[in-house]
Amino acid sequence: MPRIIEGAVSGSGVRLAIAASRFNSHVVESLLAGALDALQRHHADPQAITIVRVPGAWELPLVVRRLAMSKAYDAIIALGCLIRGETPHFDFIANENAKGLAQAMLESGVPVSNGVLTCDTMEQALARAGLKGGNKGADAALAALEMVDVLRRL
């Protein structure tokens, strides 16, 4: 039998930061509520959670990197919402956001969970922020907890 390493989803003793964009705030606030609810249901201490607000998705990678490099947190959750418009601006921001979050994670060794929605329409975003498609903020929070435990087991 091969050895299998798999993380548990528990917030007990985990220090977390959530970086949340203010752009498309009605969507991001639902993502944030979903993340906080999931963390609470998995026994994360509210006193061990720091929320940092940033203007938009473009600013998330810098703040996430700073949080990760501080080594004050076991994981970072990035939350935001990009909705495609009529220009290529969406593509530039979405691509650089994802690259920046991944770079922050790889440089710091701290898990960064990407809860930034990239949707074609507002309806798609709302569906993923707690309506029909579940809540991607909650999903990002659970992924962060699991990654903390996986890394502790390695």
Image (spheres, rainbow, N blue to C red):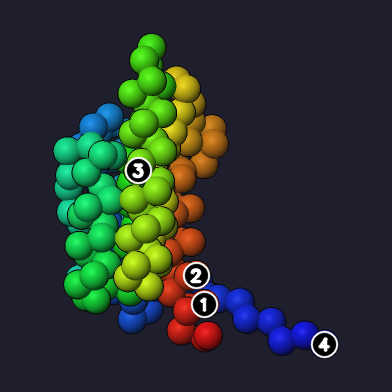
Q: Who comes first in sequence, dot 3 or dot 1?
A: 3
What residue sits right under mark 1 in the picture? 150
User: In the image, what residue type sits under mark 4?
Assistant: Met
Label 2 SS? helix
What residue sits right under mark 2 in the picture? 146
User: In the image, what residue type sits under mark 3?
Assistant: Asn
On screen, residue 118 versus residue 59, left or right, reads: right
Q: Who comes first in sequence, dot 2 or dot 3?
A: 3
Q: Who comes first in sequence, dot 4 or dot 3?
A: 4
Q: Who comes first in sequence, dot 4 or dot 1?
A: 4
What residue sits right under mark 3 in the picture? 97
Dot 1 crowding, Cα within 10 Å, few <14, some 14–19, many 20+: some
Q: Position of residue 141 (x, y in %)?
A: 41, 58
Do the residues bearing badges 2 and 1 touch, measured as CB atoms within 8 Å? Answer: yes
Q: Residue at x 22, y 44 (%)?
A: 59
Figure quadrant of the N terminus: bottom right
Dot 4 crowding, Cα within 10 Å, few <14, some 14–19, many 20+: few
Q: Nearer the viewer, residue 101 or 126?
A: 101
